[in-house]
Image (cartoon, rainbow, N blue to C red):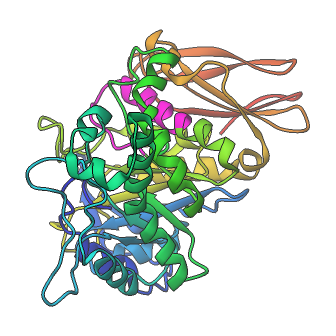
Amino acid sequence: MTIPRTGRGAAALLALLLAPALAVLSPGPAFSQQPGGETLRWADIPRFEMKGGLKAFWNVGDGSGGQNARQAYARGFEPVTLVNTYSDYWGKPRRDIRPPKDGPSANPWDMPPNFELVVRRAIEHGKPSGIYVQDIEFPFVENIEKAHGDTAARLASGATSLAAFEQAYYKKWAEWFWLPLLWTKERYPGAVVGLYGPQPFRRDYWGVAGKDAAQIDGSHRTDAQLWEYIDPHVDFYISSIYLFYDKPDSVFYMAANVEENYLRTRPFGDRPVYAYEWMLFHISNAEMSGKEVPGYLAEAMAIIPYFSGAKGVVLWGWEPQLKTARPPYAQLPRYVRSLQRVAALSDKIGRGRLVIDTPANVAWRERQPLVRTVELDDGSCVVMAIDPWQDETARSTKRVRCGALEGDIALEGRGTALAVLSRDGLKSY
């Protein structure tokens, strides 16, 4: 996955992810010298096995020549084929399809003559291994009045009214995204294809924080206009939840974005949502850029998506400065142990029914703990709860309900609690 809006390093990352990987569990080299002097190894990272249709994917490039990927696959992660669709790495001469340098375009009918050539060449080199992700990110004018003012676009649309132009405009822009998906299916009929770029509900922080449902719907109207044309061509949905801030709000930002994508895609069918994550804070926050997320957020990243409607998480990264086979992140052990906790309950989570009593944006606005339950046919529930508002050293309990059953789940600091509530009581995991 490219770092949004840059695309740097994608060629090397693509080569890494397309390499065959026959993974075996082995001690592996040392990594991450800890403050107390303890040296961690891949052998310190446990194996997990997701069931019930749940998944965890490894999409990390780190300069290790694929060694870390093989170790990750051996522990339960699945591969990703990532194609940076518009970058013509193999062309001679190179013919990239780049976003306009003078600002977002308002004319989707002005498609480069080499568009199909570049896309098909990328697809040809991106042979499937695991899920297949087309990475297509570029800005275009979303203000329809401004777009309508582009004479070339207005004439090309053939529309005689602003409303007709708007429909034609989004339909044409959608082709830039779904044509590569269609051509991928033509080349690799068995590929499981998805799109990173537009989302049914595009990644949003400030547009969700403190907003009510009507405000959120209004600011994301264009997402739905574009997505209705893309949707028939994807096999799964992506919700990007890269983190920006080391603050409790990040927990609710993750939950809200996955939840919105999940709820807005159910009318289209039951295709899975996969949450794209990064163990580092996003580069757009200069203060936090390059810093690894703290432990409580690494744990939350590994658990919350499964209780917000996602069927899987995708750990992405591009840290080419790591030239050895050591795993790239100090928080990877905690992240994988958290996945292991989910895996222990994955069969139940996968066949249960997610209950969203309080939408994530409401819990965020009211500074409540985040609580989710997955109801099972036998009347029991899998429960997830986190109170990131409390201090790391605090201890509290939260009353949770599952039909006629009730119990108190323990919340330790900012950690994410998992439990099963049944007639036998509440059992923590």
Residue 357 lies in quadrant: top right
Quarter placement of the C terminus? top right
Q: Is residue 223 above or below residue 14?
A: above
Name the spot of residue 100 as percent of width and height, x first: 15, 56
Name the spot of residue 154 as percent of width and height, x first: 29, 47
The answer to whether residue 339 shows anywhere in this view is yes
Residue 358 lies in quadrant: top right
Q: Residue at 47% across / 37% down in the picture?
A: 300
Is 243 inside the magenta-drawn segment? yes
Q: Is residue 75 above or below residue 114?
A: above
**Of 92 and 238, which appears nearest the observer?**
92
Q: Residue at 62% across / 53% down in the picture?
A: 272
Residue placed furthest toward the left: 102
Name the spot of residue 402 as percent of width and height, x first: 79, 23
Name the spot of residue 180 as percent of width and height, x first: 42, 70
Q: Tell me the magenta residue range.
A: 240-260
Is 157 inside the magenta-drawn segment? no
Residue 266 lies in quadrant: top right
Residue placed furthest toward the front: 160
Q: Is residue 8 left or right of residue 24?
A: left
